[in-house]
Structures are given as C-alpha cells and as structure tokens.
Amino acid sequence: MKGALIVGGLVYVVFAGLIKLFGYEKINKLLPPIVTGPVIIVIGLRLSSTAVSSAFYYNGEFSLKSVLVTVVILAVVIGVSIFAKGIFNLMPILFAIIAGYLICLPLGFCDFTAVREAHFFSFMDPDIRAQLLCVPVFRADAIMAIAPIALVTMIEHVGDITTNGAVVGKNFMENPGVHRTLLGDGVATAFAGLLGGPANTTYGENTGVLAVTKVYDPAVIRIAACFAIVLGVFGKFGGFITSIPAPVTGGISIVLYGMIAAVGVRILINSRLNFGNSRNLLVAAIILVLGIGCDSIPVYGTVTVSGLALAAVVGIILAFILPEGEDSRLEN
C-alpha cells in the first residue's frame, strides 16, 4: 500500500505540471458556474447524512440525549457567530466543543479509554514504529487500484479549491494557482505513503471552517499546521481528539456542511444564472441527482468512483456540449 500511495501522489504531481504547462484557463472553461455551483452543493449535502447520523444517533439508535447535545452545540455556534465581539467571534467551534464536553460528561457520552491507552509519545507505539520502518513495495495490482482514484480526487480537489475561493472572495485557481495546490496534495500524499500514513487531499469540512471563522490568512494556517505537527508527537493529545463525543462532532458538522452547500447556492446567485433556461436547469438537475443519489459506482474489482466524481464528469460534459443560449444569464 505504501508504494501505491506514493505513485498516487506522483499522479497529482504530473497533472500539476500539465496544468502549469497549458494554463489554468483550460480548467476554468471546463468548470463554469453552472457546474461548480451544483457540485459544491453536492459536496455539502453528501456529507450531511454523516453529520445527522452523529448528531441524532448514538450507537446506531436514535437518542434524545444526542439531540439535546446537538441543540446546545447549534445554539453556541449560532450565538457566538452572531453576538460575540472581537476575537471571540472567531472561535464558535472551540466554544461549541467546550460546551459539548460539559454537557456530555453528565450524560455519559465521554469515553476516555483512548486517552488512557495512548502512549505519551506517538513514536512509542510499536504499530507506528513498524509503519515507519516498513519499506515501500510497488505492486502493480495495488498501483492500478489506487492510481486511478487520484484522477477522481483531483476533480474533487478542483471543486474544493473553487469553493474556498468563493468563500474567501478570491480566485485561487489563478493565484496561487490550482497547479500549486495539486502539487501540494501530491507531494504530501507521496510523503505520507513513505511514512505509512493515509493519503492527503482537500476536505470539504475545511471550507466550512473558513466560512464559520472568517479567518482566511494563509499565515494562520501555516502556524496551525506547525502546531498540528508538534501536537501529533504526543499520543495523549491524539487520544483526547479521538474522545470527542460523536454528538459534539455531529452538531458542529451540521453547521459546517450546511455552509458548504450554501456557498454553492451563492455561486449560482452571484453568477446570475437563469434557471428558466432549459440547459441550466438540466445540467444542475442531473448533477444534483447523480451526486447525491449515487453512493459509489463499481469500475473494476474493488475500484469504485464516487457519486460526486460521476456528477462532476457528467456535468462538465453536458455544459460543454449543450449550447448556452442568449438567455442563460439574467440581465443586470
């Protein structure tokens, strides 16, 4: 698996080079607002079932206590985001986690087994040491299973970068450039594979964090990354993160995932697309149904394509071949 992940990361690197060579404008033409808007909506709504499941269910059963925790979480996030002033306005998620822990303790949702069992330093864990010392093996069957998936996640990557740009109000496809973001994902995935870690890609959840906190400065992200690297050395901290009760993460996710979908709606509104136009209506409708309705499509053996990737590909094809028409956008 290490070797397959390394190759998957190199696939990203190759495509980043091609985009740098031919220009990001080619991708922009393939991803007009009528495609990116619905795709972003799909990203948020596909994640929503996970959020609701964590928020309202506990151990697979509907729980009124979980609902209570979720209501408190939502109240804290909404209250801090709207009414808090200064620096406190930027930390609704942190306050929600603290409030969630306080209410989960008497309800019996907190399980600190992971904290007790974790080593103080992560490198003391024999499983982690074994992964680090394991030599990568490049097997053709594993590479053929992993490498094509990189093509799928690249489509999602472009959608996420477009979404981030819409939230921040900048064109990240142009500056710093989607070729650089793809290169970052590729190098990170290859390095993670070398160390025995999971693949790296963009995550829609982070878009929700941007929308909630309104902190867009890359310098802050770099500082947070350094903190994450340092904290990752301490196994007890990782155990603490694991111990966050599911109703807490579920309640926060409802806000984050909902905001992602709302960003997609905002793209459609700002683009002044006319949904009285049959072409726009059909493209958006097919993307939404395929993206939300399809979980995964078997391709070969255990290799599958996500509904999101299928919806994006079909949307790109339809938007390219169907004539736009003079009434595709509303008049100013």
Image (cartoon, rainbow, N blue to C red):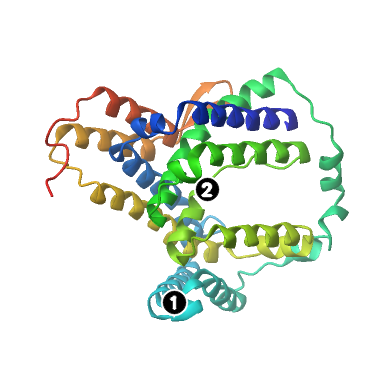
Taking the spot 51% from the left edge, 31% from the top edge, the residue there is 20
Instruction: Specify few, some or many for label 2: CA neighbours under 10 Å numbering under 14, 14-19, or 20 or more.
Output: few
Can you say whether 305 is above or below 272 in the image? above
Circles 2 and 1, Cβ within 8 Å, touching? The answer is no
Q: Distance of mark 2 from mark 1, alpha carbons?
A: 24 Å
- Where does residue 100 sit, x and y in percent of width and height? 55, 73
| Left or right relative to 315: residue 8 | right
- Where does residue 102 sit, x and y in percent of width and height? 58, 78
Instruction: Specify few, some or many for label 1: CA neighbours under 10 Å numbering under 14, 14-19, or 20 or more.
Output: some
Q: Amino acid at mark 2?
A: Tyr
Q: Amino acid at mark 1?
A: Val
Circle 2 — which element? loop
> In the depicted view, which residue is nearer to us: 12 or 286?
12
| Left or right relative to 233: residue 88 | left
> In the depicted view, which residue is nearer to us: 187 or 137?
187
Can you say whether 231 is above or below 4 in the image? below
Taking the spot 57% from the left edge, 42% from the top edge, the residue there is 201
- Name which quarter of the figure residue 224 lies in: bottom right
Taking the spot 64% from the left edge, 33% from the top edge, the residue there is 9
Can you say whether 98 is above or below 179 in the image? below
- Where does residue 86 sit, x and y in percent of width and height? 47, 80
Mark 1, residue position: 80
Mark 2, residue position: 203
> Between disc 2 and disc 1, whose residue precedes?
1
- Marking on residue 27: none
